[in-house]
Image (tube, grey):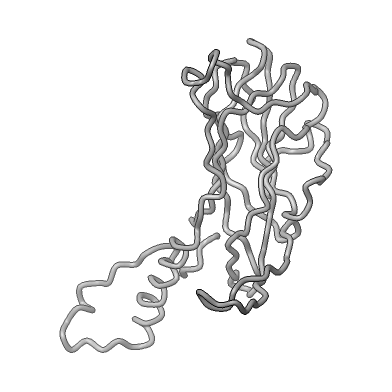
Amino acid sequence: MTQSSPFGGRRDFDLVHYTADRPIGPYLARDYVANNVMHAADQTCARVLVNDIAADDTYIVDNVDQYATAYTNALYWHVVEARGPFNISVKLNADGRPQPYRLRCAINAASGTGAVAVSYAILVVPGHSASYNVQASRDVLTGGTNVCVFDATTSTTPAWLTPAANGYIDVNMDVVSLGERSVIDVPGSTSYVGLATAEIGIFVLAYGSAAPRVYGLHVAEFHV
């Protein structure tokens, strides 16, 4: 569960609760008012981290195709793009433990050679670790915690790829960097205070016998 509201979303008041002399007791406060306030907080806090698409090459001098790429490797996942660090939203689970919001993921990509497959994945890494070692056997990343794997593509035409599983990432706190940033205490102030942060990085990975071509990337927090 990635929502804070007990009922997993907005709960409409039953008509019986709208009578003029109906009191607001603990039941209404807990199951309706508090639930809806926490749902509103979920909606407000969930944010888009990456929403990027390559420029249309018809508007580029000499019509140069725009994409991110990397070297070819048919045995191991390797990094095509690195994004972040991003400050993420964290809630408390029912047992009191911190849990980041789920991440909804999408990637627009293609193969550098027609009919030759390239596979892609989006991996969450510690926010402070730009040199995080992600080289791994292509059988290691299968989706789930901290990673979203996509079906391979053999087309040279960029398209939004189909996730191999569900299209989202459950982020484990083990890859979240806990830190502190210095910020002003009130608007217009010259005094600073420490602000605790929870940060991650996002890597786009690929493997295949053809060069990868990444044209677009979308990663956003969301609640169930």
**157 or 101, which is in the foreground?**
157
Query: Total marks drawn?
Result: 0
**194 or 112, which is in the foreground?**
194
Residue at the spot x=62%, y=16% of the render? 154
Q: Is residue 180 above or below residue 219?
A: below
151 relative to 44 in the view: left or right: right
Q: Is residue 102 above or below residue 5?
A: above
Residue 74, position as x, y percentages in the image: 79, 22
Residue at the spot x=71%, y=69% of the render? 180
**49 or 57, which is in the foreground?**
57
Residue 141, position as x, y percentages in the image: 74, 38
202 relative to 47 in the view: left or right: right
**85 or 175, which is in the foreground?**
85
Residue 101, position as x, y percentages in the image: 57, 58
Query: Where the N terminus falls, by quadrant?
Result: bottom right
Residue at the spot x=41%, y=77% of the render? 34
Residue 35 location, quadrant: bottom left
Q: Residue furthest left?
A: 20
Residue 198 location, quadrant: bottom right
Q: Is residue 205 above or below residue 101?
A: above
31 relative to 124 in the view: left or right: left
Residue 192, position as x, y percentages in the image: 64, 76
Residue at the spot x=71%, y=32% of the render? 80
